[in-house]
Image (cartoon, rainbow, N blue to C red):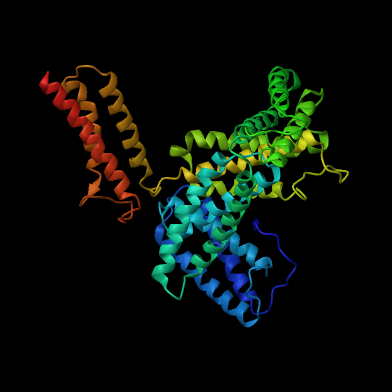
Amino acid sequence: MFSTEPLRKHTISAAEQPVLNRLVGIRNQLAALKKDRGNYYRPNDIVGLYNDLLQQVWALHGVRTSEQHDNDAYKNRLDAVLDECFQLFSLFYLALGKNKEVPATYVQLVTIKQNFELLNDTGIYTDDDLEPFKVRLQEIRQLIDAEVSRDGDEPKPEVLLVSRRLRQCETELGLLEETTRVISDELMPVYEELVHIRRRLTALSVLAHAVAAPEAKELQRRLIAIDDMRVDDRFIDSMGGVAAGQTQVVGLLEESFERLHDVQAEGSAVPPDMAPVYERLVEIRVQLDKLLLTSRWTLRETDLWSYQVQLHDIDGMRRNGQFHGSTGEPAPAQAQAALNFLLHKCYNLVYKLLSSSEPVAETLMPVHNQLRTLRRCLHEVKKYGGPLSARDLYPYQMKLSSIDNLRTDGKFLDDEGYIPEGQGVVMSLLNECYDLLYELMAAEVDE
């Protein structure tokens, strides 16, 4: 269990203890719900616990204000537990299809910040890498601003917490953008080429030497070609002057040559004492890759919590952005590159899984997935099927009718008679399937 913020060693005050006790109880209830894979999550259970959490946040706000500990820098164990609760609730809200509500954004902001911190540590990124995060932050900003406008002078506690996370991400994004902003337009293609080479070298560092050597030789050729572009060790612009962004580009070029040397050297990239961390990251990456392929059918958003915890534990082993061996010394540069590459890859996969979450409750996902499959089949039939008779189209018509008959008074209901989130998305798919089927039937009549 964890908080994504470093904790100062402040003790829990007597007034904070009841709040902490209740938060631990809420966290334990959420953990029990998460482990129950035999039943769908009930919105009333989750929202009821969430309202209880908000009461504790207000109580904490009152205690911190009275004790003059209401600044953002003040932290103790209570803040760690609170952060865990909000991340868990955020995953539960995604599982319920409540993607456009404020609580659902919290865990996404945590993951974005983790990605930003690793990008800042490695320095291997372009504006294109930042763009998806930037767009998502703008969407969350619009959501938060709308909530603040509705709340007036009394913003809700979850809005305050998410706003703080959002500000942290926006600040990190600004710092990352500033690094590339100073690079001139003429030098930017060189910088982007070096970022690509540096990434490939990092990827090669986790492969066996015999496998990595041929591509490493090609990357060496490209690096030498870039180095030959310099005049007196500097990149020159079209006017004959020194192109802006020398520090960033030359630094990345020299670092790439160093990593190339490491990749071309014989021997394992990771020393024996770091092998368990490496193997654990490889295993997590494989599991996340599988989830990315099968998430439509198998993923419960709350399943991502265990990966978040494992990755945070590994991230916590780093000091000043570096992994250290059993002697306390920083691991070799090639090992640092390999481990940081895998850690960033895992964080990025978690973010992709969160971003791919549909605004559909899990109780409605079986219907949603059937309709998506049926839509794909109808598109394929339309594209390649050729002339079709009414008999050929009958199975699709029957399947669509069986799904449509699941509705009660025009709504898809869960087992307890509640209306789950995602009605609009599912109805849109249903109508699209009907339109495709009618097109195919009309084409059959015309012929």
Outermost residue on the bottom side: it is 66
Task: Report whether 64 appears left or right of 221.
Answer: left
Residue 441 in sight from this viewpoint: yes
Residue 380 lies in quadrant:
top left
Q: In this view of the protein, which residue sits in the foreground, 222 or 412?
A: 222
Taking the spot 72% from the left edge, 41% from the top edge, the residue there is: 247
In the image, residue 71 lies at what x, y percent? 64, 72
In the image, residue 206 lies at what x, y percent? 71, 29
Residue 278 in sight from this viewpoint: no
In the image, residue 352 lies at what x, y percent? 52, 41
Disc tally is: 0
In the image, residue 72 lies at what x, y percent? 63, 68
Q: In this view of the protein, which residue sits in the foreground, 13 or 9?
A: 9
Taking the spot 62% from the left edge, 82% from the top edge, the residue there is: 66
Q: Is residue 85 above or below residue 439?
A: below
Taking the spot 40% from the left edge, 62% from the top edge, the residue there is: 44
Task: Report whether 260 appears left or right of 295.
Answer: right
Q: In this view of the protein, which residue sits in the foreground, 236 or 292?
A: 236
Outermost residue on the left side: it is 446
Q: Is residue 273 above or below residue 42?
A: above
Residue 261 lies in quadrant:
top right
Q: In this view of the protein, which residue sits in the foreground, 183 or 154?
A: 183
Task: For the N terminus, give its image quadrant.
Answer: bottom right
Task: For the C terminus, give its image quadrant.
Answer: top left
Q: Is residue 21 above or below residue 194?
A: below
Outermost residue on the right side: it is 327
Q: Is residue 339 above or below residue 85?
A: above
